[in-house]
Image (cartoon, grey):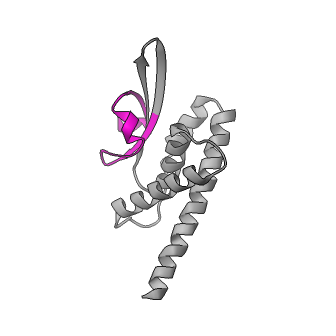
């Protein structure tokens, strides 16, 4: 039983490290690459050699790792960084998540937001998603 708890804790650390790396990469990509590159990465189909049995559990562990890493990294991460990192981690696991890009008009300003969903449920970026109209979803064949 102790061994199983230690194994889970090790898995949490590994997912945290993966999320931290994914956020750093997402931050770099957003800073340097055109949106079409971001869209291409968000639309990546991913691949999994074996079917995921506990889809919800896997997705929740990814989101938890991204949220933890985002709060603890010495850089400011916003929705596009968190969304791209989450999308890449989920797709790497073969989960058919969707990366949504939305906009809204508030006063005289245009706002944008990114969120990620899986099986119709928003996993990350949920609070702001309801205030934005989705203008693009990646991969785009899922629209």
Residue 9 % position (x, y) = 51, 74
Q: Quadrant of residue 125?
A: top left
Is residue 128 rendered magenta in the image?
yes
Q: Nearer the viewer, residue 101 or 73?
A: 73
Residue 36 horizontal/vertical position (percent): 58, 31
Q: Which residues are magenta?
A: 114-143
| Quarter of the figure with the C terminus | top left
Residue at 61% across / 44% down in the picture?
A: 26
Quarter of the picture containing the N terminus is bottom left
Front position in the image: 47 or 42: 42
Answer left or right for 124 relative to 72: left
Does any portion of residue 99 appear in the rendered image?
no
Q: Residue 83 placed where, x, y %?
A: 49, 43
> Which residue is found at the position 49% from the left and 49% from the top?
86
Q: Residue furthest left?
A: 120
Residue 43 higher or lower than 130, as above or below: below
Residue 19 x/y as whole percent: 56, 56
> Magenta segment: does it hold 93?
no
Name the residue located 31 percent from the left edge and 49 percent from the top edge: 119
Residue 3 can be seen, yes or no: yes
Count of marks placed on residues: 0
């Amino acid at each position: 039983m102790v061994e199983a708890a230690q194994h889970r804790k090790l898995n949490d650390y590994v997912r945290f490290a993966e999320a931290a790396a994914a956020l750093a990469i997402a931050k770099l990509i957003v800073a340097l690459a055109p949106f079409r590159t971001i869209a291409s990465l968000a639309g990546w189909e991913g691949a999994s050699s074996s079917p995921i049995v506990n889809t919800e559990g896997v997705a929740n562990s990814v989101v938890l790792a991204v949220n933890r890493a985002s709060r603890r990294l010495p850089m400011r991460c916003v929705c596009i960084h968190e969304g791209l990192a989450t999308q890449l981690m989920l797709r790497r696991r073969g989960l058919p998540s969707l990366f949504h890009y939305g906009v809204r008009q508030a006063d005289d300003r245009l706002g944008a937001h990114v969120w990620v969903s899986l099986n119709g449920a928003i996993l990350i970026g949920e609070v702001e998603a309801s205030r934005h109209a989705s203008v693009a979803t990646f991969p785009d064949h899922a629209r």
